[in-house]
Image: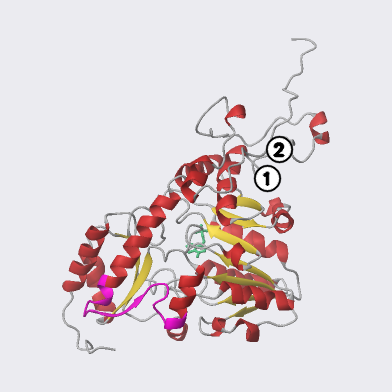
Amino acid sequence: MSGEPAVPRTPVRRGFEPLPEWVGPTTRLVHGARRPDWNAGAVVPPVYQTSTFHWPAEHSEATAHSRPYLYTRVENPTADVPAELIRQLEGGEAAKLFGSGMGAISATVLSLVQSGDEVVAAGGLYGGTTDLVTDLLPRIGVRARVLTDDEAAAPEARLGPTSRLVLLESPTNPCLRVHDIARWARACDAVGALLVVDNTFASPVNQNPLALGADLVVHSATKYLGGHSDLIAGALVGPRALVDRVDAKTYYGSSLDPFAAFLLARSLKTLALRVARQNANGAAVAAAAARHPAVARVHYPGRASPEEEALAARQMRGRGGVLALSLRGGAPAVERFVSRLRFAHIAASLGGVETLVSVPRLTSHRHMNDAELRAAGIDDGLVRLALGIEDTDDLVRDVTEALDALPPSPRAAPL
Ligand SMILES: Cc1ncc(COP(=O)(O)O)c(C=O)c1O
């Protein structure tokens, strides 16, 4: 119609209805990203499956808060929903989602370091992150230092004047060692380095690194946050100034597809319920395995030493659903144990509703030589369980019966 604007001129209202401070995590996850007024009243936010948005000339004058959306590689209203929920749960000022955990980690590191800097990989990091640090960074003039878990116990001795960014995971994969996030934060502050914590293995239900002094938190949202082994996503949370520095580099190109964002938003509603069950399953299976004669050692957050137990009790609210067992019978025992499990899929990854079992030596850590495997605490008998939300008694029974099926080992003397 003549005289009518071709597109609505009403500014887009960004942001969500605020919740009271006192609400618990599940209420927050269910109600923390409401804006039914501009979703046609829909209770469930829709999938904005569009690559681009109307952008008439007058939009260039809009303020940051009412600015319309531009292009889905940069931003999308569906992705804003899970970003907001993860932001609230981690207690950060801003959050940004990516097409994968590695997308989040690589965009963060590449945006924040420059030639001449040193990046420190503290303790056992995910293989892809280690590769980024040790292979890519040196090619752009950034020095890389990779610490063992034991070296990472003394952060003050590991940093220098050129240390610019520290990457830390706690608990670690696959030996579930616990690192002192607050102590690393103080050591980083002393030299002006940024502490980036990969909180994938804990989940924001069990641990909040920002509250412990970390500068940024990253996640493979593929794991607990997605929780159903059906999406790949990554997240970054922290102060607006730092998140904006990463956000500005949208040409790195790792953005979340709107449909994956929709699945992630749906899954986050049950995150706290799922993780509570996975914490219970992890504790029960770890206790049962520790009593079994076929098991030389159980790796579970806090079990490495009394100091790590005290640290885990201080910095975590729950220990998660991932554990690793060192079987006395070595590789043959691992093969037999894995084949006897009824419920576990043999697959990499963690945090989903279904239990997965993997052999780190053959999957996530297959790039390591024998010396590196030993330094990382990975022996021939190590098998990792990423427990799902199945009934606790069923998982304990399944693991116990698979262990019972192992022949008595000649090395079965108590360690
Ligand atoms: C601790 C940790 N960080 C990051 C990643 C990478 O995440 P994604 O697979 O979503 O890229 C993984 C993947 O396994 C991981 O375990």
- Please report the residue visible at 52 percent of the width from the left and 46 percent of the height from the top: 28
Q: Is mark 2 within 8 Å of ligand 1?
A: no
Which residue is under mark 2? 70
Residue 74 image label:
1
Residue 219: image location, x then y, percent:
54, 59
Which stretch is magenta?
288-307
Farthest residue toward the top? Answer: 1
Q: Is residue 263 magenta?
A: no
Q: Is residue 297 magenta?
A: yes
- Please report the residue visible at 39 percent of the width from the left and 56 percent of the height from the top: 276
Callout 1 amino acid = Val
- Please report the residue visible at 36 percent of the width from the left and 69 percent of the height from the top: 323
Seen from the viewer's position, the closer of residues 186 and 238 is: 186
Q: Quadrant of the C terminus?
A: bottom left
Q: Quadrant of the N terminus?
A: top right
2 and 1 marks in contact (CB < 8 Å): yes
Q: Is mark 1 within 8 Å of ligand 1?
A: no
Q: Is residue 278 left or right of residue 333?
A: right
Residue 394: image location, x then y, percent:
22, 58
Residue 411: image location, x then y, percent:
23, 88
Seen from the viewer's position, the closer of residues 137 and 233 is: 233
- Please report the residue visible at 40 percent of the width from the left and 68 percent of the height from the top: 363
Residue 41 image label:
none
Q: Is residue 136 left or right of residue 228?
A: right
Residue 145: image location, x then y, percent:
62, 80
Secondary structure found at label 2? loop
Query: Badge 1 local density, few (<14 within 10 Å), some, or many (20+)?
Result: some
Residue 143 in view of the camera? no
Query: Badge 2 local density, few (<14 within 10 Å), some, or many (20+)?
Result: some
Compute the Cα span from label 2 to label 1.
Answer: 7 Å
Compared to 72, does 220 lie above or below? below
Callout 2 amino acid = Leu
